[in-house]
Image: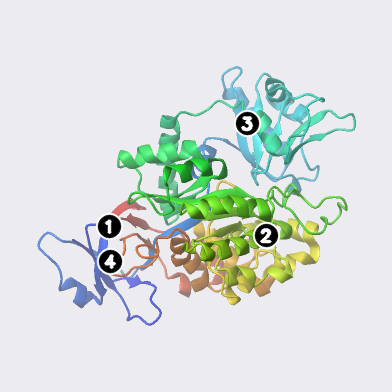
């Protein structure tokens, strides 16, 4: 038995009594109440810890990240720079320490922040001569390759654009090295593959980073290799994050045929939804829109999946007990997914099937006619609040007044929509306190764009943001009966904070970090 006392414990139970202590046994919370009440339950050999008045929250859950990609990104060149020149300098620095011919891999560039816009292959070639270079954009929906990398991939001026992707070209038709959407695979398919052991080792190391920012669970949306690595870690007892594992759309038929169902798994690894893509992203202007992007009258983005095709695939999924999670960013893509879910809900009912926990990933901009429909269909909005502050200037630039319903947390909550928050790491940092700050204040740490924040009518309260990282994310994963709260019978997953976030000035939330993280009743990380 372990007893934690002399604390401010946020359970959260709406009408519950003040709680200052809790008791834990075999990974579960078994009792809670005042210090006197819980200490009276002490047994011989119990570990008793005085938390010195610190605040205790339920462990936080990131409802959308890419665990393998995040773990690998910790080894990559950091390309999230204010200037293209700095990005190229970092590539050159890595190349100087690499073996001849080694790939130089990086992540994080955003041409919207660079005065010159996109880079080109020749610049990368000059920065790392003799090395193939491949840098993914912050959005993960574009990549930048040098001439050596394109040569290895067989890309020439005669290479056609793949379906649902494109190669940017200069005036003569020569590829510039910028690959959008599916065109990324032309080079990515030639990257050296990491072994299962390497991926496992990287994830094991990365989970320590996640504990340090208060995460005790994640919903992973990477592919097969990540699933294999996670199973290996779980089998070896090294997986100490609770992972809900998404299934890539291309494996739907196999998963259904095998009888895998959403929710199946072990204490630390569960099968989650099947992941589809309906469109691209805002940064490269490939998110599917009803009306063209401002300044690009012929561009409405890339619609990769319409409602009929999604409904067809969805029938296979729900017959097999598999929920859906569909990436949709633009208003057209979100609308198509909602239309498919409306058909799928009717299908579930007509076939006597359970109403599964279907989700839309991102929901970055809504058409006004679709505002109430997620709640009506009981579809979860799996959103990443830090995108709001990262993208606000780009959204205003390309979407204009349509941004009134961009990252519309308040509007969706007021309609009764279930929210689950995440980070989309490595697209953004996985720190949930950055996400909470963005959801509550909708402004950068610098204070931009002003005290009220960007589109302040979409701000939400801290308790609502916390719920989206706890009870909302637990519900989205089908684990609301054991995660997301600190009450008897639930897993003892929690974090200890040096201060009460509800008592802090607004800007302090951004800098808040846990002092300790517990998973299954054991401390997995402590700052001291």
Residue corresponding to mark 2:
334
Write the residue at 73% across / 66% down.
367
Residue corresponding to mark 4:
489
- Name which of mark 2 and mark 4 comes first in the sequence: 2
Mark 1 or 4, which is nearer the eye?
A: 4
Residue 108 vs residue 36: left or right? right
Q: Residues within 10 Å of mark 3 (few under 14, many from 20)?
A: some
Residue corresponding to mark 1:
521
Residue 339 vs residue 266: left or right? right
For this orientation, the residue located farthest to the left is 44
- Name which of mark 1 and mark 2 comes first in the sequence: 2
> Whole-percent x and y of residue 152?
68, 20
Q: Residues within 10 Å of mark 1 (few under 14, many from 20)?
A: many
Marks 1 and 3 sit apart, C-alpha to C-alpha, by 41 Å
Vertical comparison of 175 with 9: above or below: above
Q: Quadrant of residue 6?
A: bottom left
- Name which of mark 3 and mark 2 comes first in the sequence: 3
SS assignment at label 2: helix
Marks 2 and 4 sit apart, C-alpha to C-alpha, by 38 Å
> Whole-percent x and y of residue 299?
83, 50
Write the residue at 46% across / 28% down.
195
Q: Residues within 10 Å of mark 4 (few under 14, many from 20)?
A: some
SS assignment at label 1: loop
Mark 1 or 2, which is nearer the eye?
A: 2
Query: In front here: 261 or 62?
Result: 261
Is residue 452 visible in this depiction of the protein? Answer: no
Residue corresponding to mark 3:
188
Marks 4 and 3 sit apart, C-alpha to C-alpha, by 46 Å
């Amino acid at each position: 038995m372990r007893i934690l006392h002399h604390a401010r414990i946020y359970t959260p139970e709406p009408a519950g009594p003040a709680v200052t202590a809790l008791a834990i046994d075999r990974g579960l919370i078994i009792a809670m109440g005042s210090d006197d009440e819980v200490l009276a339950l002490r047994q011989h050999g119990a570990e008793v810890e005085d938390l010195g008045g610190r605040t205790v929250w339920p462990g936080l859950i990131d409802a959308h990240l890419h665990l393998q990609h995040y773990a690998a990104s910790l080894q990559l060149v950091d390309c999230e720079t204010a200037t293209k020149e700095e990005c190229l300098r970092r590539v050159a620095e890595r190349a100087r320490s690499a073996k001849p011919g080694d790939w130089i891999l990086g992540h994080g560039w955003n041409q919207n922040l660079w005065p010159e816009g996109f880079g080109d292959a020749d610049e990368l070639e000059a920065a790392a001569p003799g090395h193939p270079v491949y840098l993914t954009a912050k959005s993960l929906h574009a990549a930048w390759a040098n001439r050596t990398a394109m040569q290895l991939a067989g890309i020439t001026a005669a290479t056609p654009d793949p379906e649902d992707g494109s190669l940017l070209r200069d005036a003569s038709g020569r590829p510039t090295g910028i690959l959008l959407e599916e065109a990324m695979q032309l080079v990515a398919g030639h990257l050296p593959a990491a072994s299962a052991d390497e991926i496992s080792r990287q994830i094991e190391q990365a989970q320590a980073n996640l504990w340090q920012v208060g995460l005790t669970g994640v919903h992973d949306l990477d592919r097969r290799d990540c699933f294999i690595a996670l199973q290996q870690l779980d089998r070896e007892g090294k997986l100490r994050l609770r992972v809900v594992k998404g299934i890539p759309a291309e494996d739907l038929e196999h998963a259904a045929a095998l009888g895998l169902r959403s929710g199946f798994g072990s204490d630390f690894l569960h099968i989650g939804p099947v992941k589809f893509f309906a469109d691209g992203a805002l940064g490269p202007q490939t998110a599917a829109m009803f009306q063209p992007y401002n300044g690009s009258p012929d561009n409405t983005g890339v619609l990769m999946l319409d409602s009929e095709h999604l409904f067809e695939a969805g029938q296979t999924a729900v017959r097999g007990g598999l929920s859906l999670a569909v990436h949709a960013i633009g208003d057209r893509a979100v609308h198509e997914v909602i239309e498919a879910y409306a058909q799928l809900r009717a299908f579930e009912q007509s076939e006597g099937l359970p109403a599964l926990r279907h989700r839309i990933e991102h929901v970055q901009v809504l058409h006004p006619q679709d505002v109430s429909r997620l709640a009506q269909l009981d579809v979860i909005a799996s959103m990443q609040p830090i995108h709001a502050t990262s993208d606000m200037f780009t959204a205003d630039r390309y979407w204009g007044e349509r941004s009134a319903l961009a990252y519309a947390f308040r509007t969706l909550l007021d309609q009764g929509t279930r929210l689950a928050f995440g980070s989309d790491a490595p697209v953004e940092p996985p720190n949930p306190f950055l996400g909470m700050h963005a959801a509550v204040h909708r402004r950068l740490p610098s204070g931009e764009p002003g005290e009220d924040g960007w589109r302040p009518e979409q701000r939400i309260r801290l308790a609502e943001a916390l719920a989206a990282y706890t009870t909302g994310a637990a519900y989205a994963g089908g684990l609301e009966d054991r995660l997301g709260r600190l009450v008897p019978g639930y897993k003892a997953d929690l974090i200890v904070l040096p201060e009460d976030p509800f008592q802090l000035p607004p800007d302090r939330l951004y800098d808040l970090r846990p002092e300790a993280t517990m998973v299954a009743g054991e401390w997995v990380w402590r700052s001291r």
